[in-house]
Image (spheres, helix red, strand yellow):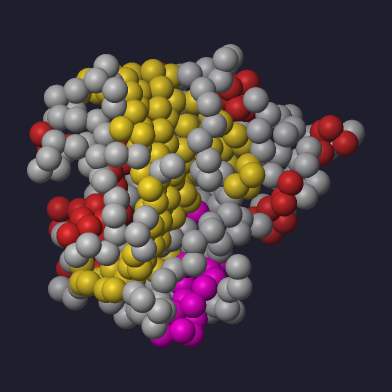
Amino acid sequence: MNVRKGHNRGGRRWIPLGGIVHVGAFCVRRGRTRMGGKTLSGGGREHVFHRTMRWGSVSTDLRESVLIPFRDWHRGLASGVVGTPKTPIDLGSSRRSDRENGASKIVPRPSAGRVFTANRQVRLGDVDAGGRLRLDSVARYLQDVATDDSKDVGQLEARTWVVRRTLIEQHRSIRADETVSLATFCAGMGNRWAERRVSLATEGGGAIEAATLWVYLDPSSGRPAMLPESFRSLYQEPSGGREVTARQEHMPLATDDPDVHSMPWWPRFADLDVLDHVNNAIAWSVVEQTLQRACSRELIDIDVTGPMRIEVEFRDAIDRDAVLGGMPLTIVYRATDTALDIALWSTDDKTAYVTAKVMVLR
């Protein structure tokens, strides 16, 4: 993928921290603007419990060599012990290209290791007019079961995470009033990140699979940190030693790209959480809005109750100023018969907040 040279905005930025936090990643931004020049992209946010502290610029790659130089960043991702590696096995994979990207595929439930389970009732506020469990509701379920898992092992306050990328595969939609059985486990690790898998199923045949790539942060500095040994000892077994990278893969659509459509979108005050940022699940509302519009205009042929695959990358936060400024953000999208690309842009056209891809699941 060719990426034009990006640029940085002046000043510091803020990230939410604390408890179990679902926020974007520490990265250096790259890409291009909607006018074909430069863009800001990277990071993204989704949060439950948090406090604030400063952070630096962001990127489509998490560079292990520069994030925390006083840690053993050069060690392989397969190793679960802190210290100097002594053998090639300790080093793990020597090339990032040898590893799969996190949250890029659905791996099966492990036969051994920790799998946390919970049940949840689908309420009327979770479904669309046809009674289907909406994607933004699924995103909230993913946040909640992650929090419940950490709380169950007594690590709720000791863990600070951010999310870069989420994949949802809906095989059959879940309906109103159904009881959803959720099962979550660790499906892969890096030095400073881990992939969480969640399966959602109902007795009526509803089936949704999801994978989210999380980055672990040092609660003092707010920078990506080495995964603690306590985390590895608990979650290494279900991951099966699978190594993953933390790349973001989407190129945000620009308004001058061929065959694109655009529409305004206003974030609401009710979308803000206690950090004064629009909650991550609202990004999935953007996907729902755009998907329904493309279907209604017969630009795409996707049955929203049937099999579909959706990728979302969280690139930057939508803060209170953007919400109360009274100016709409811009959704840019391109549709084919079976696929939909989406980008949500800031009012000044400099920041891509969210990118998404919706496809028919074969």
Q: Is residue 330 left or right of residue 40?
A: left
Q: Position of residue 80 (x, y in %)?
A: 71, 30
The outermost residue toward the right is: 87
- State whether residue 52 appears in this view: no
Q: Is residue 278 left or right of residue 53?
A: left
Q: Position of residue 283 (x, y in %)?
A: 30, 54
Q: Which residues are magenta?
A: 20-41
Q: Residue at x 39, y 18 (%)?
A: 117
Tell me which corner region of the image, top left, top right, bottom left or bottom right, holds residue 337: bottom left
Q: Position of residue 185 (x, y in %)?
A: 49, 25
Tell me which corner region of the image, top left, top right, bottom left or bottom right, holds residue 278: bottom left
Q: Residue at x 49, y 81 (%)?
A: 38
Residue 244, above or below 53: above
60 magenta-colored: no
Q: Residue at x 54, y 71 (%)?
A: 30
In the rendered view of the protein, which quadrant contains the C terminus? top left
Q: Position of residue 110 (x, y in %)?
A: 56, 20
Q: Is residue 261 left or right of residue 229?
A: left
- Identify the main secondary structure in magenta: loop
35 magenta-colored: yes
In the rendered view of the protein, which quadrant contains the N terminus? bottom right
